[in-house]
Image (cartoon, helix red, strand yellow):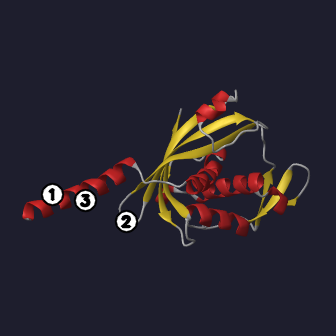
Amino acid sequence: MRSIILWAATCTVFVVLAVACFGASVSADEKKQLDDFFTPLAEANTQSFKQQSLTDSMLQDFAQLFLVCHEAKSLRNKNRVTVLIPAARVDDVTEKYFGRKVSRHASAEYEVSSCSNDVELFSQVDELIALANDRFEARGTSYYVSGGTKLDRHARPDTWKKKGIQVGTYATFTAVLKPAAEKGQYVIVEYTLSPR
């Protein structure tokens, strides 16, 4: 009887380790959400960091680009090429992505140039792996395509190839995530970019 219990316990440990090593099953909807979550990091050319090494400058640059490229209609224009971003909006973005605010803003708002669409960058998460302490590791790929190209950013590369769409691989990345206060969301604890 002891040998059966020992065998069952060993099998259970093996299954848990196998899931941890080879990746958790990710639903199609969650994969799309993760793809969209990581795309702004590719757009901002976010470099590798650990949570402690994120500087105010890195946080500000990321948030400003995110807002200019994704929420430009909600921002006030100073002129044809410059938009004004309130510091509070920057903090909203950095809290959503990194779980923290900028420690000190130089001013109450930032003047930022409009978003350029000559080349579009986007990401896909290929794997989500459960780690210890309620953490996850996301592994993915960042791609680039000429601005204005119509394609399904969530499709697989072979689908783009069959349709004759030229998509390049920009980098691969890994990120350690922890659950955010909002259910089903994450914040990024560390990020490793490996350009191709």
Task: Please state which amino acid type lies under the numbered disc 2.
Answer: Asn
Which residue reaches farthest right? 79
Q: In which quarter of the image is residue 166?
A: top right
Marks 2 and 1, the one that precedes in the sequence = 1
Q: Mark 3 or mark 1, which has the lower sequence index? A: 1
The amino acid at mark 1 is Trp
List x then y, in percent, for residue 170: 59, 35
Tell me which numbered mark, 2 or 3, is placed earlier along the sequence.
3
Q: Is mark 2 on a helix, strand or loop?
A: loop
Q: In this view, does 80 lie above or below 169?
A: below
Q: Residue drawn at (52%, 40%), measured in percent from left and top?
A: 172
Residue assigned mark 1: 7
Whether residues under marks 2 and 3 lie with C-beta atoms below 8 angstroms apart, the answer is no
When asked about the image quadrant of residue 181, the answer is bottom right
Please count the marks in the image.
3
Picture disc at residue 133: 2
Q: Do the residues labelled 3 and 1 touch (CB within 8 Å)?
A: no
- 44 to 101, vertically: above or below: above
**Foreground pick, 38 / 76:** 38
Compared across the picture, whether 80 is left or right of 55 comes to right
Relative side of 189 to 37, left or right:
left
Q: Inspect this view and state whether residue 45 appears.
A: no
Residue 99 visible, this orientation: yes
Q: Residue at x 52, y 44 (%)?
A: 140
Question: Looking at the image, is mark 2 or mark 3 nearer the viewer?
Answer: 3
Left/right placement of residue 109 relative to residue 55 reads right
Q: How far apart are the two marked residues, 2 and 1, measured between alpha carbons?
A: 27 Å
Which residue has dot 3 on it?
12
Residue type at mark 3 is Thr
Q: Where is residue 79 in the image (x, y as percent from the top left)?
A: 91, 53
Give residue 29's position: percent from left, percent from top. 59, 56
Residue 176 position within the rendered picture, expressed as x and y whole percent measured from the top left = 46, 55
